[in-house]
Amino acid sequence: MWEFLANPILQITFRSLQISGTATLLSALWGLPLGVAIGIKTFPGKQLVKGVFNALLGLPTVALGLILYLLFSKSGALGFLQLFPSPQAIIIGQAILVTPIIVSLTTSAVESIDPDVKDLAKTLGASDTEASVAVLRESMGGVVLAIIASFNRAIAELGVALAVGANLRGRTQVLTTVIAMEINRGNIEYSIQLTIILLAIVFSITILTNLLQRRIK
Amino acid sequence: MRKNILIWIIALVLVAVVSVAGTAYFVGGGPKKKLVVSTTTSLYDTGLLDAIEDRFEEKYSADLYFISVGTGLSIIHAQRGDADMIMVHAPSMELTFLEEGYGTCRKILAYNFFAIVGPKVDPANIKDPSPLQALSKIVDAGRRENAKWVSRGDDSGTHIKEKELWTAAGFDWALIREEEWYVEAGSGMGKTLQVADNLDAYTLADMGTYLKYYKDGIITLKTLVTQGEELLNVYSAIAGNLVRHPHINFEDAITFIKFLISEEGQEIISNFGKDVYGQSLFYPAVNLLKQNTDPTIVQWIKNYAFFDGYECPPEYLSDHPELYT
């Protein structure tokens, strides 16, 4: 049993799930409230804020990876944190990467539900926060989609993980970085195995959520 | 509505035509024949191959394409017929490549020495004439948690050299790679140097890449051990095999190898980097081997990079004996 758990493929897979899962959770922590707030509030510059988050949806991972590497590397502005190379650095990078996805999709989901929900909640004596929670519950489908899309983007990205994790064996290797390395080493078969695992994770999570959502409705 | 769809289709067709035409324009399709060379990163990343390419293309009509990867993938490229020739630095893998019938006309082009580099404070105190003793000291210091070692870990020529060094120093690489102080980067030389620099660790580096990163101020690691037969690094060129892959550009591959071993080609190799780094990054090997000008080095090269006493065993010459006269 323990020998099975020491299998490098399993370790890499677990590390991938853990890093990208944590990154998604982190970005949900700040992204969901932000998305709901932008969705239900009216304030000057709202369209601009939404535009910025929409633009950041297409943030190239190599660009973000490079910026974070320059910040985290020993001679960078945040070099004293000693984050390069580490799994923590990948988590931070992926969390930043998927934040625009969470915010934009949550905002759209919130905006698409009937504005009466919030008013109704308020007439029934709900506080601002309680009303927000009611709105969030109504737009649950969109929120779940936001989280799943974020996780899939995180686990499938290569640029950030390679730049700030540096693909250290047994330490910062994740599925995508190992696939890229094994292709370079000429181990095409091993890369294919890992690619199948990566695809299986992405697809099965999507299918599971679809089933769950149907069950809820 | 219908009008909108029409405009959309026109736009789509326009974009498609422009992008396809643009790609075709840039990717080539000129009268020149393509010569695809799959090469180790240390030759390419230093800029040597760019210098060679310019001079070669002035004289000959072939159009050089370099694919810069590790020695492992270079060989796969040639095995699959994706490359017409390779330029690599891992004699043990080159021999297998020849024996499997994928390569012909191997020529040793140049040599230099790997260096063991590490933090300025040198926690393992490896300033010592012998590379193998230095490695033992690093292992001791590593086990006392005083030092770290970063390995390329990518099956490149440098990584293969590193594994050979551990074996020669009396260690089982498969065991020490599991130890806490041993870090595997699984990346190119540049990235590995950056990781070592950030971890204050030792690593094995090719001088070319090291000097480039050091002079550019990207790393502060110092060269600590640079001498010794064990650190010898030999670069060779090997053409593909027409029998295996009839479509490869064998003719231009031979022309290019001849250029590399010509006086002009060897001079480019010899002078490369002198202006920027104050020293040669690669030493030419052709005249050295022909005239035996430095018997010690020649003997080292023969011990390390000759197969049964041959630069290229006769069965792999492929009707080009003139390369060896």
Image (tube, coloured by chain):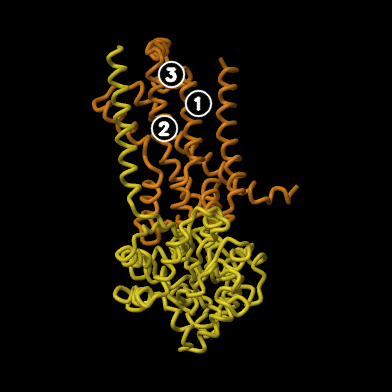
Mark 1 → mark 2, Cα distance in angstroms: 12 Å
Kindly state the secondary structure of the residue where label 2 is placed. Answer: helix
Task: Mark 1 and mark 3 in contact? Answer it, CB < 8 Å.
Answer: no
Labels 3 and 2 within one chain:
yes
Residue found at the far left of this picture? A44
Q: What residue lies at 44% left-to-right and 47% top-to-bottom?
A: A160
* Numbered label tally: 3
Q: Which chain is yellow?
A: B
Residue B25 image point, x, y percent: 31, 44
Where is mark 1, residue-wise? Answer: A144
Label 3 to label 2: alpha-carbon separation: 19 Å
* Amino acid type for the residue under numbered disc 3: Val
Q: Quadrant of the N terminus of chain B?
A: top left
Of residues A95 and B84, which is closer to you in this image? B84
Query: Looking at the rendered structure, which numbered label has been put on residue B46?
Result: none
Seen from the viewer's position, the closer of residues B111 and B267 is B267
Q: Residues within 10 Å of mark 3 (few under 14, many from 20)?
A: many
Chain shown orange: that is A
* Residue, disc 3: A135
The image quadrant that residue A32 belongs to is: top left
C-alpha separation, residue under disc 1 versus residue under disc 3: 14 Å
Q: Is residue B244 visible?
A: yes
Q: Image quarter for residue B5?
A: top left
Q: Is residue A26 above or below residue A135?
A: below
Q: Which chain contains the residue that carries disc 2?
A: A
Left or right of A182 in this view: A112: left
Q: Which residue is mark 2?
A: A101
Q: Residue furthest right?
A: A1
Residue for point 50% across, 26% down = A144
